[in-house]
Image (tube, coloured by chain):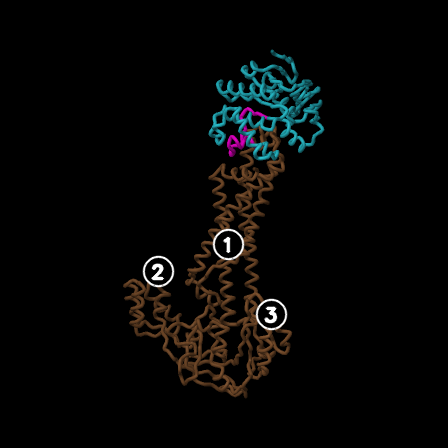
Amino acid sequence: MITAIAWKNIWRNKTRSLIVITAVTIGVFAGVFSMAAINSSVVQRINAAVNEELSHIQVNNKDFRRSADIQNVISNYQEVVSELESTPGVTKTTGRIIVRGIASTATKSAGVEINGIDIEKEKEIFTLSERLIAGTGSYFESDTKFNTAFIGEKLAKELNIIRYMITPEAITALKNDGIPADVISKIEALQGERFTSDKKFEKAYEKILESGDTKKYGWKIKEAAWSYREGSKLILTFLDADNNQTGAAFRVSGIFRTNNDMFESISLFVPIEELRQLTGMREGTYHRVIARLSDNEITNQATPVIREKLDDYEVLNWKEIQPDLAMMADFMNQIYSVFMVIILAALSFGIVNTMLMAVLERTRELGMLMAIGMNRRKIFIMIMLESVFLSIVGGFTGMAVSEVVIAITGRTGINLVKYSEGMEAIGYSAHLYPTIDSQFFITTTILIVITGIISAIYPARKALKLNPVEAIRSE
Amino acid sequence: MAVVEINNVFKSYHDTEVEVKAINGVTLSFEKGDFAVIVGPSGSGKTTLLNLIGGLDQPTAGEIIIAGHRLSELKPSELIDFRMDHVGFVFQSYNLIPVLTASENISFIMNLQKWPKEKMTARTNELLSSVGLSDRHKSRPSQLSGGQQQRVAVARALATRPEFILADEPTANLDSKSAEALLEIMEKLNHGEGMTFIFSTHDVRVMKRAHRVITLEDGKVVSDQKLE
């Protein structure tokens, strides 16, 4: 009965209740959706780091990371692998030879970390092969007598392997993309020129286009002008096992694109046999053994177990290798708390205000209820329930709207390509796919109900202080 | 048998520095089945006396005993339960719960007392029929006329068969036809169910039907007439 009356009471002043519910809905939606968007960028970054760059666990010779000396090897590779593979949660392992060197083309050179990899095993652990840019070759699938290297787009740009040219094909692509004819005719003036970096190309087209057109079509023009010659050559120079400088010519097998500029500009992958032969490293020796776990979540449990087994080596998990990622995850929780406090405070003020007005308007009715025998506990519960209902209706609507919008944008993504340069420089994707776990929804629901209850205490206490005789007489 | 005993009751209010004696030594008793009206000019203390009898207010001095309960000995929370169990209220401005239907308003106190559903429904229907509103049981107060609302209020007051009904100016907001109809119903209930009614009123129509007329002036009983 009390519950039914409380529910009916909130619909007495439909406009006011709907305004409060709408405000709560918008507040909850804004909070939850922003959280989902922020969360997605962190989750995507962590997934990218684990799936493309680091995997879950790395085992190195204890001195390797400090000095990167080619001699700091894991000599009993098989033993290390069997210890890893006998650890619960470890699903795959692979070994790498890693040397630091210089990659050069005819015009440029850059410092790189050359990773000799077991191509098939790497495919089982990393998804980097899937990040191949279409039209740039393959992930070590070409049948060639040359040494081959899989390199990042950023490095390819730095080495002038990728350049920007307005070719007849680029013009056709722009026409097909619906770029206005006047923009295309201006761009045609750049035909025949070769730009060795995107910055130089940007400056060139910014000079001839209106600033509005630059903002609107710039990235499409860059995409169309992006040019690469398959099988480009580069020279890798590094020290061999005897600390003598050595090197060899490599053909670019393919170019990958990730969201991490730093990784793209430094990491270079070659087949392990080629690197072993060039460095003269003994068979069975590796610099790093990488292990994949069945789930990110078991990283903290698996790490000490592996560390105990392999105490002669340096065992690091992805959180320890890139502490900024772990910090971001913690930071997310803090942002979440701040967001929730703001949302719940706004919710609370709205409810206190509405319920105070409701109590004030119904003074005579509350007095009558006390007079005819409704005790104070029941009146208190009734006011509390009204507040909780308002919170729940607004909160649940907000969460339902959030759930739908997150589901849609989680599929379609949110394109922040305008900010891609800045975001990718720090390893974050410019395409966000909002996601939030169900625990967040459960926690938010509980917090909304608690806020509703707390917010109702003051108005409910006001109602309890009414004197029935005076309340009945009030207008 | 006295349902209500009022022994030398005083009630004073302090209006700034002046003490206002709203009830000034009233001694009265009401028997079961009384149909009594309290009359008097505005400010004579009618409503205050009704509030004291209903346990809504506490006397400054004196004693009120209802169905063997000394009201002064009851705690505020016990007073609320006491009102629910022993007193029925009818207010001048109906005071129904606007979000409930006529039926729900009538069964409200039975609900608070946790009556079994079948018993509650039967009693609600019986009362709706007694006040001639069986066909309006689903109507909300806003869909009823003033007279109909006051009949629902009477039915609500009667629902749990209290010791007596206190009606403060029940006909003040009604037109004469509705007032007559309401009084007829109350009279019938008084005869039929033996329900005790205590009114405060200025309305001559109520006085005409009363069996007893108590006149208050300046908080004192100046006459107490039993009529045939």
- The residue mark sitting in front, 1 or 3, is 3
Q: Position of residue A69 (x, y in %)?
A: 56, 82
Mark 1 neighbour density, 10 Å: few (under 14) some (14–19) many (20 or more): many
Mark 2–mark 1 Cα distance, whole angstroms, equals: 34 Å
Judged left or right of residue A280, residue B22 is right
Mark 2 neighbour density, 10 Å: few (under 14) some (14–19) many (20 or more): few
Please state the chain letter of the residue tagged with numbered disc 1 in the rendered image.
A
Ranked by sequence position, the earlier of labels 2 and 1 is: 1
Q: Residue at x 53, y 77 (%)?
A: A94
Q: Secondary structure at mark 3?
A: helix
Q: Position of residue A109 (x, y in %)?
A: 44, 79
Judged left or right of residue A188, residue A281 is right
Mark 3 neighbour density, 10 Å: few (under 14) some (14–19) many (20 or more): some
Please state the chain letter of the residue tagged with numbered disc 2 in the rendered image.
A
Q: Which residue is mark 1?
A: A32
Ranked by sequence position, the earlier of labels 1 and 3 is: 1
Please state the chain letter of the residue tagged with numbered disc 3 in the rendered image.
A
Q: Which chain is brown?
A: A
Decide: marks 1, 3 in contact (CB < 8 A)? no
Q: Which residue is mark 2?
A: A212
Mark 1–mark 3 Cα distance, whole angstroms, equals: 32 Å
Q: Which residue is mark 3?
A: A302
Q: Residue furthest top?
A: B228
Span of residues in magenta = B89-108
Q: Position of residue B185 (x, y in %)?
A: 54, 20
Q: Amino acid at mark 3?
A: Ala
Q: Which chain is cyan?
A: B
Decide: marks 2, 3 in contact (CB < 8 A)? no
